Amino acid sequence: ALEYLYNHRVVHRDIKPENILFNGYGQPFLTDFGIASYNESEISDSNSGTLGYMSPEVMQSQSHSYTADYYAIGVIAF
């Protein structure tokens, strides 16, 4: 799902367990694109998302990009 989003330059910005659903075959689906953003280069949109899954740069309201989504996946996997 993330690869598809990034190929289309979309940053989800709120990846958390509640936004990952599974179908009957165990395939994951990403939901809740309410604060997703089209990523032209970097997002400097302050700290949007869910606190426990935010990357350090998002928490500090610094410029960030799709890598913040990967950080959230890492938190979930850990």
Image (cartoon, rainbow, N blue to C red):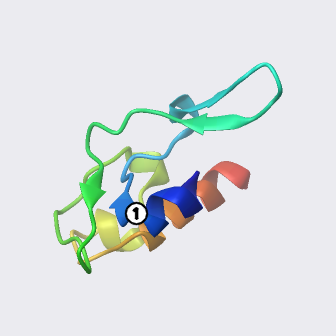
**How busy is the neighbourhood of tag 1: few (under 14 within 10 Å), some, or many (20 plus)?**
few
3 and 66: which is toward the camera: 3
The residue where tag 1 is placed is 8
- Which residue is at 60% across, 56% downward? 73
Measured as percent of width and height from the top left, residue 16 is found at 52, 41
Q: Which residue is drawn at 23% across and 75% down?
A: 40
Camera-side residue of 62 and 34: 34
Res. 33 image quadrant = top left
Q: What residue type is labelled 1?
A: His
Q: Residue 63: image x %, image y %?
A: 24, 78
Q: In this view, does 42 lie to the left or right of 4?
A: left
What quarter of the picture does the C terminus occupy? bottom right
Up-down relation of residue 21 to residue 28 (above or below): above
Looking at the image, residue 56 lies above or below residue 48: below
Question: Residue 11: in sight, yes or no?
Answer: yes
Camera sees residue 72: no
Seen as rendered, the residue at the extreme top is 24
For residue 67, side relative to residue 9 (left or right): right
Assign a secondary structure to mark 1: loop
Front residue of this view, candidates 57 and 10: 10
Q: Is residue 67 above or below residue 74?
A: below
The structure residue drawn at horizontal position 39% and vertical position 33%, both measured from the top left corner, is: 32
Give percent across and percent down for residue 10: 36, 59
Q: Could you tell me which residue is drawn at 47 percent across and 48 percent down?
A: 52
Residue 64: name its quadrant: bottom left
